[in-house]
Image (cartoon, rainbow, N blue to C red):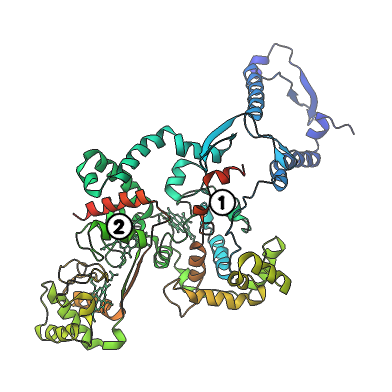
Amino acid sequence: MKLSHESIEINAGLMIVLTLIAISIGGLVEIVPLYYIKDTIEKVEGVRPYTPLEQRGRDIYIREGCYTCHSQMIRPFRDEDMRYGHYSLAAESKYDHPFQWGSKRTGPDLGRVGRKYSNAWHTQHLNNPRDVVPESIMPNYPWLLRNELDFSDIADRMRALKIVGVPYSESEEEYLANVEQFGVEMAEQFDINKADQSLITQAQSEDWDGDRSRLTEMDALVAYLQVLGTMVDFSKYDEGYFAEFR
Amino acid sequence: MVEQNRGKAVQTTGHAWDGDLQEFNNPLPRWWLWSFYATVIFAIIYWVWYPAWPIASSFTKGIGTVTYQSGGKEVTTHWNTRGELIEEMQRGSETLKQQAYLEKVAAASYDEIANDPEMSAFTQSMAKVLFADNCAACHGIGGTPAKIGQYPNLRDDAWLWGGEIVQIQHTIEAGRTGFMPAFGSVLGEDKIEQLANYVLSLSGHEVDATKADAGRAIFQGTEGGCHYCHTPSGKGLASQGAANLTDAIWTVADVPGASDDKARIQAVEAVIANGVQRQMPAWQGRLNDTEIKLLTAYVHSLGS
């Protein structure tokens, strides 16, 4: 059969296959080089994987669809810099699977919301945004305070992330490599064998949702929000440094 | 189309479906074709000017450049959005206009800012935006929070931590933790009711005189110890951020929102029983010194 206009047009199966090939080329040309280009991810200190508690908070963020209204990607424009702070680096989401850059901003960007507000504010706001921001159109999430946090499968979740490259540790060797890279305190948190205990300890280390006697989904989500955009200390770098990676 | 082509001998593609369904083979309209060629030419110029094609571990950098100051040196490099942002933050026309004012404000004293109409107009307009972006989620648009209790009103001239410029600036830079212990389990219901009567009497409310008298003894004695923070007069120590209880302005207990005497007592009782723990975040690091200065001047002007 000749691959003529006619034979493609009257053969739906062939048409679908060829269409997919044409579209894939467009995608591959954009995506594949990023794996090979040296400067995609900036070399900066401080970026680390999420702790078990933060990771559970992140899962809840995704479950609740917060990304449908919030981006986590401050773009390199003057107005965004003045409103939100330093633009987001690729390095800052290198342990995010999937990343939460987003593109829809019904609400503000959350890329640097960490430690901007108090834990109490986040709890009040998520429970009912209009308690603190009367004109808000963000939905209520009252169940976050009611639901106990289920972390029975936290070790499996960390194992899954390990497969896609997040350096959580299982063996002694991996643990020691983490000590080297992130320090003892953090390496403990990234140890899959101690995930349950680390999660509980961090949940009790701070008054996340205003009640330390219970471990709720709110605890995890607030812990996650409070770490967003806080890992890199930008005062240590000259602005020009980041431009060298582009 | 059909009208237009009638009479002319239009070619068809030669394909036929269902026996008689045919397809015209008209040439593309001219305007469409030329637009298409124009986009091709645009793409080629784009590839030459901007970073475009990946090559192994690098990419074509384009011939466009961007120049900015970095580490004391002038850097000229291939065009990229980050470099362009730096350039704009250093030499953009909007930036320079704003910079002139910012430098003037940074060098001036608070008195000079307040007395210079141009500087104070700039301060107001810039600080309003900063306030809306950073502070309004808690303190409300313009400084009046959603309700009494969680966050203090910045528009009244009653200050927990002091309303002098230096005090406000310190509040914003370093943050504050408003803390009062919970007395519920220590004192018990009766004493807390007596205290509430006494506290309300300080701001001129009608109260039960006997209970208020008993409350005074607890407040001023070691049992309640309220006077350590609220001072014997009830005006409160600014160094503790302790509320002034005599001024009929309420920051935690929603007394103005209470419908009757009983509800007022209950509102105050709840605060004494549960204590207070409120946090004002620190802004040093997130905002720069000039931004904090603008906000300080703005917040100071709200209170007066």
The local secondary structure at tag 2 comes to helix
Q: Position of residue A131 (x, y in %)?
A: 35, 63
Subunit bearing disc 2: B
- Mark 2 and mark 1: span between their CA atoms? 35 Å
Most foreground residue, B136 or A237: A237
Identify the residue position indicated by label 1 in the image: A101
The amino acid on which the numbered mark 2 sits, given as a three-letter code, is Gln
Up-down relation of residue B255 to residue B291 (above or below): below
Asked if residue A69 can be seen in this view, the reply is no
Asked if residue A54 can be seen in this view, the reply is yes
Q: Position of residue B97 (x, y in %)?
A: 36, 35
Q: Are marks 2 and 1 on the same chain?
A: no
Residue B120 lies in quadrant: top left
Q: Residue at x 16, y 84 (%)?
A: B215
Residue B113 lies in quadrant: top left
Q: Residue at x 69, y 65 (%)?
A: A162
Q: Specify few, some or many for label 1: CA neighbours under 10 Å numbering under 14, 14-19, or 20 or more.
A: some
The amino acid on which the numbered mark 1 sits, given as a three-letter code, is Trp
Subunit bearing disc 1: A
Up-down relation of residue A155 to residue A91 (above or below): below
Q: Which mark is residue B169?
A: 2
Q: Position of residue B12 (x, y in %)?
A: 76, 20
Of tags 2 and 1, the one toward the viewer is: 2
Most foreground residue, B282 or B22: B282
